[in-house]
Structures are given as structure tokens and as C-alpha cells.
Image (tube, grey):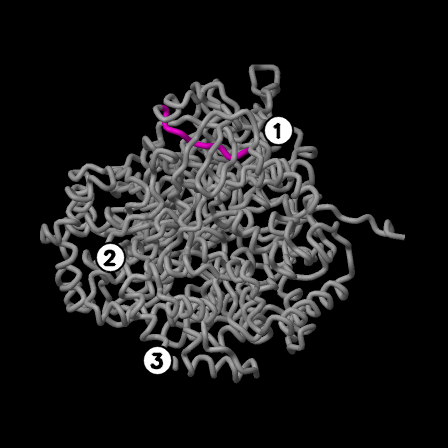
Amino acid sequence: MSPDKLVYMANQIGKFFAHKSDEEAIAGIAEHLKSFWEKRMLAEIYGYLDAGGKGLDDRPSRALQQLRQAAE
Amino acid sequence: MGLIHEIDYGTKPGTATRLVHVNIDGQSIAVPEGTSVMRAAMELGTQIPKLCATDMLDSFGSCRLCLVEIEGRAGTPASCTTPVAEGMVVHTQNAKLAKLRRGVMELYISDHPLDCLTCSANGDCELQDAAGAVGLREVRYGYDGENHLDSVKDVSNPYFQFDPAKCIVCSRCVRACEEVQGTFALTIEGSGFNSKVSPGIGESFFDSECVSCGACVQACPTATLMEKSVIEIGQPEHSQVTTCAYCGVGCTFKAEMRGEEVVRMVPYKDGKANHGHSCVKGRFAWGYATHKDRITKPMIRAKITDPWREVSWDEAIAHTAAEFKRIQAKYGTDSIGGITSSRCTNEETFLVQKLVRAGFGNNNVDTCARVCHSPTGYGLKNTFGTSAGTQDFDSVDQADVILVIGANPTDGHPVFASRMKKRLREGAKLIVVDPRRIDLVRTPHVKADYHLPLRPGTNVAVINALAHVIVSEGLVDEAFVRERCDMADFAEWAAFITEEQNSPEAVSALCGVPADLIRKAARLYATGGNGAIYYGLGVTEHSQGSTTVIAIANLAMATGNIGRPGVGVNPLRGQNNVQGSCDMGSFPHEFSGYRHVSDDATRQMFEAVWNVPLSGEPGLRIPNMLDAAVSGTFMGLYIQGEDIVQSDPDTKHITAGLAAMECVVVQDLFLNETANFAHVFLPGSTFLEKDGTFTNAERRIQRVRKVMAPKNGYGDWEVTQLLANALGMHMHYAHPSEIMDEIAQLTPTFAGVSYAALDRLGSIQWPCNEQMPEGTPTMHVGHFVIGKGKFIITDYVATDERTGPRFPLLLTTGRILSQYNVGAQTRRTENKLWHEEDLLEIHPHDAENRGIKNGDWVKLASRAGETTLRAKITDRMALGVVYTTFHHPETQANVITTDFSDWATNCPEYKVTAVQISPSNGPTDWQVKYQHLSGQARRIAVAGAAE
């Protein structure tokens, strides 16, 4: 799956929570990703994150890190 | 099984609560005040002769056949127009009345051909019945005088003919067109002896404004307006009540049969969704069921470049199972999946998702709602707690202000649109939010109070602006919000919505709608009484589709327009069973009843009944499946009743994904466009060939009843069962009712649903359980399903699909009345006469700037692709916006649409594509190539040719 597409999708989700505090937004983004993203998509974007995560907005990036930590 | 005869009471039922006692021919009865004498008599079983009266229409009193005598009153009043009064004593038959009726009847018959034996209405003619009832034995006037017997028939309509020689000018057809359909296409031309029914001024039925809904044909008491199928076949001998397989209105029909041949489909008066009305699709466009293009034998091929090879069902199923097992052994458990169909029954979609979850061992199941109303599910679940509309269709009768957003009901949901238009003619106000001037904005006797022609992609901004006015001008229903909603959420939302960026003045620059218009519309919705919102794919098919649904829910909660008849949030579902396919657990993250797969208690319940461990992780959505296919990790797909190549966005992306797979299985009626990329074709069955249920847009579960044997040998549910068993599952349902029993066992909102209950009640709106054993017409009465209604902030985020120098126009897509979805069914009926090709609607100024004239071929190009089609120049388009339909594969409008999608659900952004148009001489290279591929892919090897 194209990392560019996944990054775009993650950033889109982040924009929905623009009016929320950091804490609420990150929790909301993480919950959304957990609920709707298949594991291949998550694995792909985790790998992209490890490679620097270029283009990922700050909040989606932190939400992904939080989600991965919770899964480990 | 015989022919179902519905009682015609002659006039509509009284609705008053006060009862009036009358005596008719010595029998007493109490009926609601306002009931006609004719109806009261019929309720006693006394049929007063009549011709111009029928209970679908308002009383008219023209035929003078239904005369009665009433003690204490002079003369012989018409019983259809005379309301009952307390203590009234009525005589429906005596010598005087008999003589009068015979005299009237004699005059009618003196200008009517006496060809009863060869007449198509023989046996089903009210004129014939009335002549018998009044004891007509002679006609003294002869045929020497002036008459209409040589009048010329109008056979222009493909489905019915008009024979004026048989017309008695009762006006039932004209009144049906006005009162029931609301089109006002028919009139009585001339006066006196020269009076005649006319579909316009010197026009034929086909060329007139007639929409072929069939209401006039149904209302006609003679053979004047008659279905051509009855003329060709003869009168039906038995009938079965079933549900239409076209749009989300879910009309109930009587399938009237002669043997296994459909003679006609007649709308059923007891149908709770349609109350005896129909549209051109459900009423007439069922011929596809026996079209020569239908594939009835299974076929397989090793490569998609090979011709198809017909095989036995055993070989096709064994081959498919072996391929799926091989793929899973090679690429892993998650390498295959399935797509359920919104055209198939609840039972069939339930089985497909069961096959995927329990048989394939993953959650890679999705449905075509992905590309239409998935944002509705997301938005309404998060605000109200339920992924469905809040009302029944009858609710519109009590609406005072109707707000239509991104929907075109007269084309997409025509039978409901007729109800809506009737309410508007009664005085309800109308606000339309749509880039196009849809018919509702200005149609006979209906005119929108406000039309907000917004720029595509700015829905959230406009709805936020409406809410801004409501909050900032103190129009919030504070009592409702305080009692029913989460106040902390409301306070946060109210602070957001009153920010300057959400004001009409700020939003106007984005959306192109004058601020004053937005303010007036907001005030009307908030203060005009019962406010009801109806919306369609113009809301959901955007990058902010889910956000728009949430914004709509916010608007309804803020104004207290939830939880009672006449109000609500009403998604107009596209296909016949979109609601049902979603209810049945077709999404990759949810079991039936919208419960997440990660919920342990729910999953364990399914595991216990299905006797297999289930995955608690969400599976792939359709676009993700195609991405994974290109990446080499998703290699097999079972597609039941969907044509994703034609219906889904960015065709090149879809075809690349399918071409990358090793086993694509298509189960359908026809070799559709997706089948061009398939390795296995399993023939499907029509709604006439199987039992089951559909669930319409108002959550109404209705029976589909088999009226003929499946031409392919199996109902679709049986095919899925064969495949499941070949994969090692143990599915042994003997009848779809057993599948429904399992659905009810596993789905709390369906707990009280069974075929026995459906037969008893006619239909059931879920939730149906111990608390609501007969179903739930109106949701969220007293409290929301979620508890307290949840206001959610809806920031406007502009789509990244932007116009610019290369692509300066915006394309939006939709559908038309005569065609349905990808057109696979309707293109194989006479409906094609109304829409032979997809057209590009262009504003006159945009066309003139490019030197394009009406009917010219134009090239339509976006960054995704290009196609050609003919231009239709119309000022109903906004400047800078063009529109087309996606009904024809030759056009492939989705070559143009992009892969942008809703942030929450990946519902594609069909409604906003930046495009350019230019004059063209012919098809694009892509069209030429695709046409060739399509021809090659549909080759079927002649049996024995290999030897």
C-alpha cells in the first residue's frame, strides 16, 4: 500500500480533531485508526514512521506512536 | 394461490377521531366523521356502483352513478361526495335509483365500443362491472350519432397505450397524475362532448411531461390506459406481494402472474412505504429478468484474457474453493475477502459476511455502501447512537419545513418525492441546498422558498453557517437541548459555531451563496414548525461526508427537530437494500447491528453460534483491498451483485487492483464490467426468483417473495451456501427464513423479526424487540439511543480537489429517473428510450466560452482520466459546475472521478472533481481500448471447440 496515501488519510483524520486539545485529538485519532484501519495499513505506516514519517502531521504521528505502544 | 383483489372503498378513509353512526340499507355502522356515504357502505360490504370514484383519489362526483337516497333529504346525492352525518339513514338501491343509474350507464355505453370479448380489460373492467351491477340490458341510442369510436390510439409510451375510444372521461387519470404523482402532465382538453384526456398540448404521452409512473394506468377503470404486457399476454391469474428491487424507497408490489410469466407489477395499496404508488422503474422496468443477456450457467477461465468456459455448478464451486484455499495457503489468511450486495436480500448479505468472517477467517468484507452512505452510518451513530434515519416516510405528512440537502428525490426516490410534493402543495415550506436547480426547486405547484446553490464541496461550511445563525440569533430550542443532549458538548459546539469563520458572511465567499439567503433559510428551518431534513449522496460523497452528516445532526438537535413525527434526519438511501446490507454486518469493522468486531462479548456470541473463532481486528475496506492487491498481499475476491469497475471511483485504480488478483469471483445477473476482470462467473438470481427481505431507507424490513424458479438454478443465498460448504463450513439452511432466525438470534435490533411476524404485520421497522414488538417508526423518542445527544464540532476543511487553469470546472455526478445505478438492469429495459446515453450538463455561459453547442460531443478530462460524451446545455447548472450520470459503461464517468475520499469512511468524493471540457470528435483512446478489452473479456468459448 502506498505510504503517501496512508499519510494523506491519517492527516485527514487529524484535521477532524483540529478544534480539540492535543490530548483529546491524539486519543481521538488513535481510536479512529484502531477501529477502522486493517493491520497491514497500520504496519505500513508504522514502518514509514520509523523511516522518519515525512509528511505526517504532528498529531497523527503522535497518535500512531501511542497506538503502537498500546499494542505492544 | 389466486389473484389478490384489494378492496376499493371508493373514497379515502376518514381521519377524524369522532365517530358518526349511520344506517345504510338497514345496517348500522359507526365511522369517523367526514367519511363518505360510499365508503361507509363499502365498509358494510355494500358496493354502490361507481366509475369516477376510487379510494386512491379525492372524491370528484362526476359520473352520477353512485346516487343514493337519504331520508329527510331531497334528491339523489352522489354517495362519494356526501359525508355521513349522525343518525343518517341511507338507501343505496330502489327502483328510482336503479332507473337513474341505468339511464346514466346507457349514455356511457352509447359511446363505448362493445368489444368486451376481445378487450384487454375483459375480466378487469369497472365499466363492464358497473353495467352488470346496474342491470343494463339495452342501449337505445345506437352508434349512428357522433361518437369517439374511431379515435386514434397513442402507443408512443413503451409500457402502456392510450385508447381514447374507450375513455369515459372520468378524470381518474388526470387526478392521479395530480394528486398521487404530482406531475400534472395530464389534463382534460376541450369541453362537453369534445372533452378528452390529453398529455399536453398536441403531444404524445412519450413526448409529454409524463414520467410513466403508472398511476394513471392504475386509476383507469376501463382499457383506455392499459399496460402493453396485459394486451400481449392477457389478464393475470395469480399474484404475490413482494418488494421492489430498485431504490431505497422499497415499494410494495403485487407481482401479477400467468404461470411463471410476470404480466404486470402493480403497486400495493397496503404497502407502508408507497401506499399504492410506483415509479417507472418498479412498475414497468422488470424485463431485465428475462433479458437475453442473462448468464445462467457458471463459467471459469484461467486468465482474464482467456474466453469464458461454461462448466457445471459443481465444477465452478469446487474450482473457486480450491483457488481461495490455494491463495490463502500461499499468501496468508488475510489475502482474500468478499463484497456484499445492496441489491441482494438481508439474508444473502448476512451469509456473505458470515462466509468471510467464519469461512475465510478474516474481516475483509465490505459493501457498496462504502461508496454511498457509509458516512451516514458513521455520523448518525456518533451523534444519535444509531446508524440509520430517524423517521418513517409517513412523517413527511406532518413536516412544516422540509430541508433537502444534496438529494434529488424526484429522480432518485420518485415515489417518496410524490409524497413530499403533496405535503408541499398543502403548504409546507421548502429549502433546497444543491448546486443544481433540481426539479423540486421549481415544479408544478411547488416552488422552493429558498434555493441555496452552493459551490460543490462546501456543504460543511453552509450547514455550519445555518447553525451559526440559529445559535447567534437565539433560535436554539434550549429546553430540548437541556433535556436531551450533553450540555458540555453543546457548550463547546455553540462556542465553535458562533465563531466569525462560521458566519454566513464569511461562508458566503467560500460557497457562493449570498449571506442573506443563508440567514433566511436558517430562520425558516428553526422557527417554521416541524423541520425535517432529507439528504442524499450530495452530502455523503465528499471528503467531509461524515462531517456533513454530523453537522446535519447538530442542526436537528439544536432546533429540537428529533424524536417525533414530522421532523428528523432522513438519509435517502440509494439502492434497495443499502440499509439492510449495512445492518447485516457488511462493513469490515462491524457485526450485524453495528457492533464492533473488537467487542469481546459480541464476538463471543457469534463464535458460540457459528462454532468458530473470529478475528477481533477490522478488515480491509474496498479501496484498501484494491491497494493491497496492487501491493501483492490481497489476491482473491468474492463479489456478489456489485459492479465496482463501473460504480466505484477512479476506474483505472479499480481495474489495476482487480487485474493484480489471482481469483476474482463475480456473482451477478449479467457479465458486468467487473466480470471483465474475473476468473469465475457465478450466475445470480433476480428478486423475482427467491425469498428474502429488503430493508428500505426508513428501516422497514419487507418480504421479497419468489414468483418463479431461478433461471440459473439457485437463489444467491444458495450459491453462497454451496461455496461455504466447499470451503469446509457447515451451512445447511433450507430456507431464507432460517437465516433470518439466526440474524434475529444474533442481532438485538432484529430480535423480534421473523417471517411469521413479517407475514402478520406486513413489514417491520427496526428496532424490533421486546420493548417494541411491532417495530419503531420514529427513533429517539424521549431519549437518544446513545443516551444524551452528542454535539460534535465540525470544522470546515476544503477539499484538496481544486480547480485551476488546467481543470477550471467542477464535475458532480448523479442519477436520473429512468435509470438505476450502473444501469445493468434498466439499460436492459425500454427505460433506455428515456436515457440512451450519459449526457454532460453544462451552464450556457461555460458552453459558449468553449464553443460547445447542445448535442455536441465533448471531451471531459480530469487529472484521473478522460472520456467523451454529448453536451446538454441547461441553465439549471450553476456557472462553473458540470454534471453527468454514470449509467452507461460506454461513458465510464468514473474514469474521471478521483481517489479522494471521506476522512472517516473512505466514501469517495464523487461530487467534486476538477475538470476541463472541450469539443471532441469521438471517443478517447481509453474508451477505444476499453471497448476492445470489454469485447475480448466477454467471449464465451463454444462447447466442444477445443476438441
Question: Could one spot residue B707 in this view of the protein?
Answer: no
Disc 1 to disc 2, how far (Cα)? 76 Å
Residue indicated by mark 1:
B138
Which residue shows up at 51% across the image and 57% down it? B342
Which residue shows up at 58% across the image and 27% down it? B156
Q: Position of residue B167 (x, y in %)?
A: 54, 28
Q: Is B133 or B97 nearer to us in this picture?
A: B133
Q: Chain of mark 1?
A: B
Left or right position of B784 against B123: left
Which stretch did the figure color magenta? B836-844
Q: Quadrant of residue B80?
A: top left
Q: Are marks 1 and 3 on the same chain?
A: no
Above-or-below relation of A15 to B234: below
Q: Position of residue B664 (x, y in %)?
A: 63, 59
Q: Is B377 or B678 nearer to us in this picture?
A: B678
Q: Position of residue B614 (x, y in %)?
A: 52, 79
Which residue shows up at 68% across the image and 57% down it? B679
Q: For the residue marked with disc 2, what is the amino acid?
A: Thr
Foreground disc of the pair 2, 3: 3
Residue indicated by mark 3:
A70
Q: Chain of mark 2?
A: B
The secondary structure type at the circle numbered 2 is loop
Residue B794, label in figure: 2
Q: Residue furthest right?
A: B947
The secondary structure type at the circle numbered 1 is loop
* Mark 1 in CB contact with mark 3 (< 8 angstroms): no
Q: Quadrant of residue B847?
A: top left
Q: For the residue marked with disc 1, what is the amino acid?
A: Glu
Q: Are marks 1 and 2 on the same chain?
A: yes
Q: Residue furthest front?
A: A51
